[in-house]
Amino acid sequence: MRGKLVVGNWKMNGGLRQNDALLADLRAGWMASPGRELAVCVPYPYLWQAQAALSGSAIAWGAQNVSEHAAGAFTGEVSAAMAAEFGCRYAVVGHSERRTLFGETDAAVAAKAVAALAAGLTPIVCVGETLREREAGATETVVLRQLDAVVAALGPRLSAAVVAYEPVWAIGTGRTASPAQAQDVHRLLRARLSAADVAAADVPLLYGGSVKADNAKALFGCPDIDGGLVGGASLKADEFLAIARA
Ligand code: PEP
């Protein structure tokens, strides 16, 4: 039985004082619950704050990106091992904002997933098509190409990853994929993962893209959707907790 995982992606939002309030509200409002896990992925400078606020709670934390390199002359980069030193369980890799705004290729995303696992982090590998790609009928080709790069790089370590399907047209737009649209792609991803490695059949598959308290239940109720990656709505404790309980 696969459980439910809900992960907040704060993106480049936050500040010491507001984080304190948000993390305290999350901690107070979330009880350990079998088969359900909650996590927040925060900007690097706040990893220590998440660690201080959430240690000993049922909420995990993580980074929103890691370098594919282990160490060296990569000014401005942060390694997976550095994130792990702050108690991270997760690292998002290949978020569409990283792919489109920072030119991350499928190969770079795969290398980041490898680096995350090597440091003991669980990579949350994001895949998803743009609106233009969907309208051109290329959704399957795009998401499978993105997934296959990671499958090839991880080999048998694939079963330790998480995959998030995030249609780019649904991220931060308020335009959510319908449960049927999301389930169609999740079924495809699940089939590809199981074909690659039987142990990967149970890799958690998250949906991301304008998840809110009022649409989470229908999305998470789909057979191949194991939870969500939540951007904007993860910045409000009540909304995020309602999504996590959906
Ligand atoms: C995200 O940042 O991964 C995301 C899905 O954002 P939003 O929930 O705001 O669409």
Image (cartoon, rainbow, N blue to C red):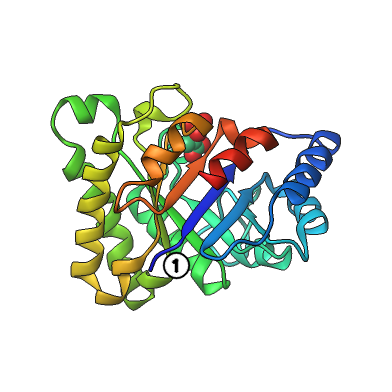
Residue at figure coordinates x 31%, y 76% from the top left? 199
Asked if the residue at label 1 sits under 8 Å from ligand 1, the reply is no
Q: How many marks?
A: 1
Q: Amino acid at mark 1?
A: Val
Residue at figure coordinates x 28%, y 68% from the top left? 201
Is the residue marked by circle 1 packed among few (<14), some (14-19), or many (20+) residues within 10 Å? many
The picture places residue 230, in percent across and down from the top left corner, at 52, 39
Residue 9 position by quadrant? top right
Q: Mark 1 falls on what kind of element?
A: helix
- Asked whether 173 or 11 is in front, the reply is 173
Residue 191 visible in this rendered orientation of the protein: yes
The residue to which callout 1 is attached is 114
The picture places residue 28, in percent across and down from the top left corner, at 78, 49
Q: Is residue 199 left or right of residue 46?
A: left
Query: Compared to 244, does 5 lie above or below?
Result: below
The picture places residue 218, in percent across and down from the top left corner, at 37, 38
Q: Is residue 199 left or right of residue 211?
A: left
Residue at figure coordinates x 29%, y 52% from the top left? 223
- Asked whether 70 or 231 is in front, the reply is 231
Residue 145 visible in this rendered orientation of the protein: no
Residue at figure coordinates x 40%, y 45% from the top left? 220
Query: Compared to 182, does 177 lie above or below?
Result: above
